[in-house]
Amino acid sequence: MLGSRFQLNQNDPDAQTLLNTDIPYNYVYDRNNWKRRKRGGNKIVARMYMLNVKDAERFYLRMLLLHVPGAASFKFLRTVDNVIYDTFKQAAFYRHLLNLDEE
């Protein structure tokens, strides 16, 4: 499902302005594709799985998905100011989503 969200963000300019959690309010997932929602977007419960901070890379990936609009790929999420970082933790740090490196 995340891969199809990346594809949506690559192909739809309106989706590029939305955070990952806002997509279900404006689009519906149907048969492995996201389609623009016609009605009922105000009655949606958007869900993201909870992660333990000990599962570091997935935790920081989730953090980036919550704060970076228009995520089009994993590489896009790891890119900050035209620098591609090796880990999601580094990308979150350089996006100023962490106060200290130890968080």
Image (cartoon, grey):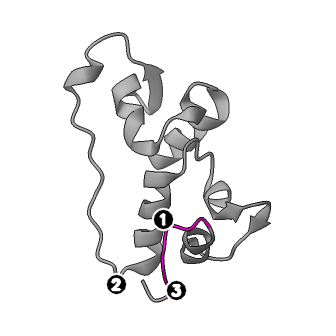
Secondary structure category for the residue under label 2: loop
Dot 2 corresponds to which residue? 54
Closer to the chain start, of discs 1 and 2, is: 2
Closer to the chain start, of discs 3 and 1, is: 1
As shown in the figure, which amino acid type bears the numbered disc 1? Leu
Q: Can residue 70 be seen here?
A: yes
- Judge whether residue 59 is colored magenta: no
Q: Residue at x 56, y 71 (%)?
A: 88
User: Taking 35 as reference, is 83 above or below it?
Assistant: below
Secondary structure category for the residue under label 1: helix
81 left or right of 42?
Answer: right
For residue 37, what is the image quadrant?
A: top left
Q: Residue at x 55, y 30 (%)?
A: 15
Distance of mark 2 from mark 3, alpha carbons?
Answer: 14 Å
Q: Number of numbered discs present?
A: 3
Q: Nearer the viewer, residue 73 or 64?
A: 64
Dot 1 corresponds to which residue? 61
Q: Residue at x 50, y 40 (%)?
A: 5
As shown in the figure, which amino acid type bears the numbered disc 3? Asp
State the image coordinates of residue 20 (x, y, percent, origin top left).
44, 44
Q: Which residues are magenta?
A: 95-101
92 left or right of 28?
Answer: right
Q: Residue 4: give its label.
A: none
As shown in the figure, which amino acid type bears the numbered disc 2? Lys
